[in-house]
Amino acid sequence: MGRSKTSFGKREREKKREKKREEKQRKKEERKANPGSGDLDSMIAYVDEYGNIVDTPPDPAEREEIDAEDIVLGIPPKEEGDEDPVHTGVVDFFDHQKGFGFINEIGTPQRYFVHITGCEEEIIEGNKVSFELEQGPKGLNAVRVKKV
């Protein structure tokens, strides 16, 4: 008499496949029976005015209208009441060989970097100077430096 060509391992794999097919078919039938659980409306989330995620849509009565012309893109224009761009200070340190130094602003504890290219006149330590500020790669730099 001949032996069966199916081994124990092969029968176990076939049982597992059959069990997976039955489980898949059962889940499919459950989804058909309960159509409300996976619809798109249950997946939608809303964001309230504080940035929190909520389930309810925002109330249209509380909606605030914004005029598109009121939105400013970029840097807002300077107004007349802005501070004076010219500052005064005292040269605290200046190295002529390396071409840079520092200026202490009068009336504040601020200290600004100055490069020789930003000087309009030759300056030395202790000079009282007027200058303007510009944003540099590492912070504010003094430019258009003149003796007072």
Image (tube, rainbow, N blue to C red):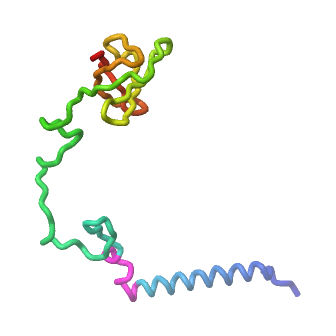
The residue located at (35%, 23%) in the rendering is 90
> Magenta span covers which residues?
32-42
Residue 85 pos. (x, y %): 23, 29
From this view, report whether residue 112 is shown above or below residue 22: above
Left or right: where 103 falls relative to 26: left
State which quadrant residue 18 falls in.
bottom right
> Where is 69 relative to 133, above or below?
below
Residue in front for this viewpoint, 37 or 118? 118
Quadrant in which residue 46 is drawn: bottom left
Residue pictured at 15% horizontal, 70% vertical: 62
- Asked whether 56 falls inside the magenta stretch, the response is no
Residue under the image location 38 percent in, 25 percent down: 103
Q: Nearer the viewer, residue 4 or 46?
A: 46
User: In this image, 38 relative to 62: left or right?
Assistant: right
Q: Residue 12: where, in percent of width, then height?
A: 73, 82
Is 132 above or below relative to 97?
below
Where's residue 31, x and y in %?
A: 42, 84
36 or 31: nearer the viewer: 36
Q: Could you tell me how many numbered marks the image carries?
A: 0
Quarter the N terminus occupies? bottom right
The residue most toward the right is: 1
Where residue 112 appears, as percent x and y from the top left, is: 38, 29
Left or right: 96 in relation to 61: right
Main SS, magenta region, reads: helix
Q: Quadrant of the C terminus?
A: top left
